[in-house]
Image (cartoon, coloured by chain):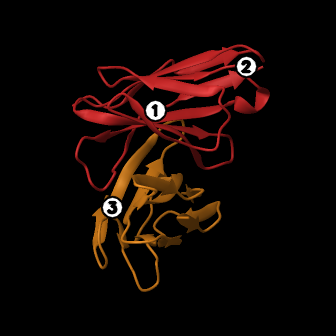
Amino acid sequence: GDSVTQMEGPVTLSEEAFLTINCTYTATGYPSLFWYVQYPGEGLQLLLKATKADDKGSNKGFEATYRKETTSFHLEKGSVQVSDSAVYFCALSAYSGGYQKVTFGTGTKLQVIP
Amino acid sequence: EAGVTQSPTHLIKTRGQQATLRCSPISGHTSVYWYQQALGLGLQFLLWYDEGEERNRGNFPPRFSGRQFPNYSSELNVNALELEDSALYLCASRRAGDSYNEQFFGPGTRLTVL
């Protein structure tokens, strides 16, 4: 079945450091890929998405490129802020058993310290 | 555009009781998804409703059930509550005709079972 593997957290960075959160996936067909963010005490918000190979999703300084050859969708940001502290979920959407199903990774907690 | 709303925000029950959680999707969204997020764990898919019908369910016992109303709002019912049901329950909705399955999440209901 489909699966998403994220790097385990927590990830602790100093403000203005470079961020990479790795995400790889297994899916049949051509999934759409997403990054969601969950701030403390809140639900998930869509951060960015990519719907086909080589697409780059970007939002709020974050970006991720859909790499079909390496089945990856790594999240990057050049300079993190304290306000980026949250849990980040990688997800894929693909047809499975006749339905379009979303599979989430386990989440990676990011803590940014001043 | 109003987002996905969930009620109540917090719910405290004792073992053996029943809990009812409610979700109102974004206007124009016909699909509702329910997820369980237990402490320290990722999102576990519970149920998917579309156009009033249950389309798919995750690996949860039958005491987790729900329904979707004609206005597309949804209820999640958990019978015979157990301590391990304590979790954040997230509802998400999807726009009719969206082929990428981008989901919009509510803030969640925090269920505590004592």
Kindly identify which chain the residue marked by label 3 belongs to.
Answer: A
Q: Amino acid at mark 1?
A: Pro
Q: Are marks 3 and 2 on the same chain?
A: no
At numbered mark 1, what does the secondary structure look like: helix, strand or loop?
A: loop
Q: Amino acid at mark 2?
A: Ala
Q: CA distance from mark 2 to mark 1?
A: 25 Å
Q: Nearer the viewer, residue A21 or A31?
A: A31
Give coordinates of residue A111: x percent, y percent.
Answer: 58, 56
Residue A44 sits in which quadrant? top left
Q: Nearer the viewer, residue B34 or A97?
A: A97
- Is any atom of residue A41 visible in this view? yes
Colour orange, chain: A
Residue denoted by label 3: A49
Q: Are marks 3 and 1 on the same chain?
A: no
Quadrant location of the N terminus of chain B in the rendered image: top left
At numbered mark 2, what does the secondary structure look like: helix, strand or loop?
A: loop
Residue denoted by label 2: B80
Q: Colour of chain B?
A: red
Q: Nearer the viewer, residue B33 or A44?
A: B33
Task: Determine whether A59 is above or below B42 in the image.
Answer: below
Q: In the shown orientation, is residue A63 left or right of residue B33?
A: left
Residue A73 sits in which quadrant? bottom left
Q: Amino acid at mark 3?
A: Lys
Q: Name the residue furthest front.
A: A98
Kindly identify which chain the residue marked by label 2 belongs to.
Answer: B
Give coordinates of residue A99: x percent, y percent.
Answer: 40, 52
Kindly identify which chain the residue marked by label 1 belongs to.
Answer: B
Pointer 2 local density, CA inside 10 Å: few below 14, some 14–19, many at least 20: few
Q: CA distance from mark 3 to mark 1?
A: 21 Å
Give coordinates of residue B73: x percent, y percent.
Answer: 36, 23
Residue denoted by label 1: B107
